[in-house]
Image (cartoon, rainbow, N blue to C red):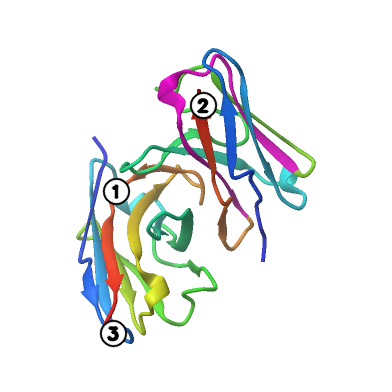
Amino acid sequence: SYELTQPPSVSVSPGQTASITCSGDKLGDKYACWYQQKPGQSPVVVIYQDTKRPSGIPERFSGSNSGNTATLTISGTQAMDEADYYCQAWDGSTVVFGGGTKLTVL
Amino acid sequence: QVQLVESGGGVVQPGGSLRLSCAASGFIFSTYGMHWVRQAPGKGLEWVAFIRYDGSNKYYADSVKGRFTISRDNSKNTLYLQMNSLRAEDTAVYYCAKAYSGYAVPFDYWGQGTLVTVSS
């Protein structure tokens, strides 16, 4: 079965750039999405189709996907961005989530 | 606005059954694929099942295949998940989620979730 691998945790200082990676075999051949989940809340999509940002999502969120790795980048990270982030892909018959990355802003 | 409201969660014994419902409003339910996703306490997201807009195709995670059945009633704007032969490892918050226009992913709207606890 298809697997997506994320680092368990990433730390960033306020105002700096955070990068969260998601690795999977030939992931660049699929569309990658990213979700943000804050404690006690349902997930929210922040990036879809590799690079697209839904309305209402700040411009500081961006995405890329090439080769075996998709990356979520948060520029000028704010305290409110502290959350769990999950990557996701569709392999044609199943949806796969990465294990999640806890982003700490300190 | 889009609303997804899950119901039907609760405590069930191992080997038991439960049916979850997801009432949808604020969009044309019959034109969108729908998913179930679960999250065990303190753990990550796990996709459970997907049904296309017209119910013509259904997809399942290996962990639930043969035990869970996803279905929908487009006349009632409602999504269902029939869960049989429940195990302790099925304990989780179950979310329904709406698929983005014409695609299986991403999920552009999520419900608030309903908790299923499998315990004797």
In the picture, the quarter occupied by the C terminus of chain B is bottom left
Residue position marked by numbered label 1 in the rendering: B111
Mark 1 vs mark 3, CA separation in Å: 24 Å
**Label 3 residue SS:** loop
| Residue plotted at (49% across, 69% down) | B60
**Amino acid at pointer 2:** Arg
Numbered disc 3: what chain? B
A79 in magenta: yes
Which stretch is magenta? A69-90
Which one is closest to the eye, mark 2 or mark 3?
A: 3
Residue position marked by numbered label 2 in the rendering: A53
Tell me where residue B26 sits by quadrant: top left
**Amino acid at pointer 3:** Gly
Q: Looking at the picture, does residue B86 appear above or below residue B50? A: below
Label 3 neighbour load within 10 Å: few <14, some 14-19, many 20+: some
- In front: B97, or A106? A106
Q: Looking at the picture, does residue A74 appear above or below residue A22? A: above
Ranked by sequence position, the earlier of labels 1 and 3 is: 3
